[in-house]
Structures are given as structure tokens and as C-alpha cells.
Amino acid sequence: MKKKLFAMIIAAVTVMASCSVSEGNDSGKDSGETSPKTENTEYKYGSIDIPGKDGALCGAPIYIAYENGYFAEEGFDVNLISADFETRKIGLNNGTIPIVNGDFQFFPSIENGIDVKVVDGLHEGCIKFAVRPDSDISTVDDLKGKKIGVDEIGGTPHQVASLWLENAGISADPADGEVTFLPYSDGNLEFEALANGEIDVAALWDPLGSIHEKAGDVKIVFDLGTDPYFEDHFCCFLYASTKVLNDDPDEVAALLRAYRKAQEWLYENPEEAVDIIVDKNYASIEDKELAADLIKSYGFPSAAEHDENWDAHVESDVKYFVDGLSKIGYLESDPDEFAKNIYQKVEVGK
């Protein structure tokens, strides 16, 4: 019964999972404006669209690869776009959008027919659960009977909360009535609901939860990047169009090189990265000190980490979350077979 109930929830979800869409805005470059040119650049792969105008701080590798010219260096004239679920689905399936970043909530979307493969890991987490400062909630064990705000039923904060609850022996199945999930289309509305007592817990994307924590408006009871179940595992991956992988795997390899350059630069230069991201309005945060702390907390890898063991790390984390989501009924496929089918190693080269 639990698998059927969760399958119904996933079937009702109409927004594709992505760390870069849940706290979206229309910041960043306007549609139609393309990559900063590097000297004597020849665009081997021509012009491509990449969804990257959605305002999430954890989407930093996209903004840095764009602004520092890494996409251009690898042969791409990139156009950063805003893209809803249907646009992403169509683009990925027909290859006009070659790559997107997304969290493990993407897995049920793949099970439901989106033709993509996991090809790399991106970062380790940007979700926090907040309660009112005077709340008596301090651990997952205090959540039974509580109301939890999320951005959408079936979305990543909902799935993260479900994994957190189920691993503590509390059912996240709505039929069992042990917790209640309430969706809010905007993080600010969710925070208002928390402040006025409509909900007991707000599952918030960064930077909103961290901004309110620093202001003293909330206390944080869960951090995706430090919770024992989630820490040191990628929550967000890079997904490549299967059509592009089949037609031109070198194009995907070049894109991954650009992303890895950006990840490594972020690791080495978090403060400078924040100057770019905030000054160019890629993310909705004005506190650069806080933004730099968050960038550091996301676990963007150093150059040394992109070694011969890297692909095994990514593949292992895919299996880890496939197992977790299968256990609580978010996936119906055989977990071993599904994990094997959705990951594809790409020879990135230098």
C-alpha cells in the first residue's frame, strides 16, 4: 500500500526536480544573451541552452562556468534560460537541452520516462528544516503529529523529510497520519506560515532558511549537508540527455569538464565566487559573508578529488539514494537494476 500511495504522489508532481528551480526567480542573464567570449574562441559545439536562471545559490557551478568562460573554453556558446518542467522534459528527450542539474528527487521522474542519465555529482546539500525559536522541536523524534511545510508534495524537501522520518521510525505516508505535509508555492509564504503557527516545521531551500537563522527568526533542526544519513553524499547530480550521450558523448564530456573547472574554482575561491553571484543577481541573497559560508558548506570538490575514484563515488551515491527512496516507496523498480541503468560513466579527459 505504501508503494502505491507514494507512487500516486509522484505521479501528481508536475515540476521536475532541480536544486536550481525550487526557490526560483528570473535573475541572471536574460534569455538570448550568450556566453562571455574568450579570445579566439571557436564554438565547436555551437549554441546550446542550459537551464540556469532560477536563483538558487547551490547552482553556483553554472553561473561560474558561464561567467569565467569555462563553457566557452570547452566549445559552447551557452544561453542560460528559465525552463519549466515541460520545457526541460522535451529538451532533454530531444537533445536540445543537453544537461541539467538536479537532486535525487529526479529519480522518480526518470522512472516515469524522462530520458536522461546521471553523469556526475555536483554538491552535497542546500536544504534546512526550520522551527520557531521558542519551539520544543529539536530532533526528528519530535516530529510525530506535526505539520511540515514543503515547496511541493513529491518535491525534494518532501522526499528529504520523508527519508529523515522513515529512518527514525516515523511514517511519512499520508495514509498513516503520523505527520502532515502542507505545500507552499513560495518559500517566503512557507516562512510566514511557520511564523504564524500554521505549520510546525518549514523545509526550506537555501539561502532562505540560513538568512532567517542568522536573523534569529528560526532555529535549524536539520541540515542536509551535516545530517548523518545525508552528509558526504551528493544530493545534487548532473543529468545528461541520453540522446546527446548516444549521438555525441564528447559533447557531454566537454560539458563536464566545464562544470568541474567551475566546481574546483568555487572550492578555491568562495568569496570571489560570491561577489560574482551576488553582484550579477544570480541568487537572492545580499549577505556576502553568509553566502560564502554556504558555498563552502555545499561540498564542491577540489581538483584533487576529481581523481580515478571520482566516478565510483558518484555511482555509489546514486545507489545509496536509489536504495533509500525505494525503501520508502518513492521508487517501484528493482533498486539494483534501476541504479545501474540510470548512471553512465563518461570519460571526461583533460
Image (tube, rainbow, N blue to C red):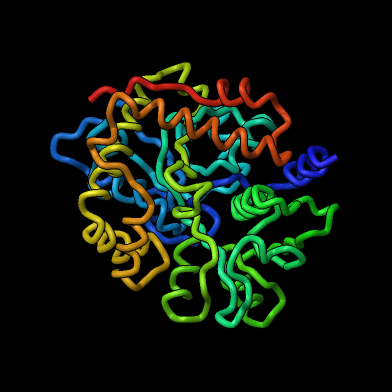
Residue 284 point in image, percent of width and height:
42, 67
Q: Nearer the viewer, residue 306 or 34?
A: 306
| Vertical relation: 125 (above or below) 320 | below
Drawn side of residue 49 relative to residue 151, left or right: left
Q: Say which quarter of the image contains residue 157.
A: bottom right
* Residue beneath the point at 33% across and 46% down: 300
| Vertical relation: 281 (above or below) 49 | below
Drawn side of residue 289 relative to residue 323, left or right: left
Q: Nearer the viewer, residue 16 or 133?
A: 133
What count of labels does the image hold? 0
Drawn side of residue 347 relative to residue 150, left or right: left
* Residue beneath the point at 25% across and 39% down: 261
Q: Nearer the viewer, residue 66 or 126?
A: 126
Residue 29 point in image, percent of width and height:
37, 55
* Residue beneath the point at 36% across and 35% down: 47
Q: Nearer the viewer, residue 90 or 13?
A: 13
Q: Say which quarter of the image contains residue 277.
A: bottom left
The quarter of the image holding the C terminus is top left
The quarter of the image holding the N terminus is top right
Residue 117 point in image, percent of width and height:
52, 27
* Residue beneath the point at 26% across and 49% down: 267
| Vertical relation: 256 (above or below) 233 | above
| Vertical relation: 176 (above or below) 280 | above
Q: Say which quarter of the image contains residue 188.
A: bottom right
Residue at the left extreme of this rendering: 39
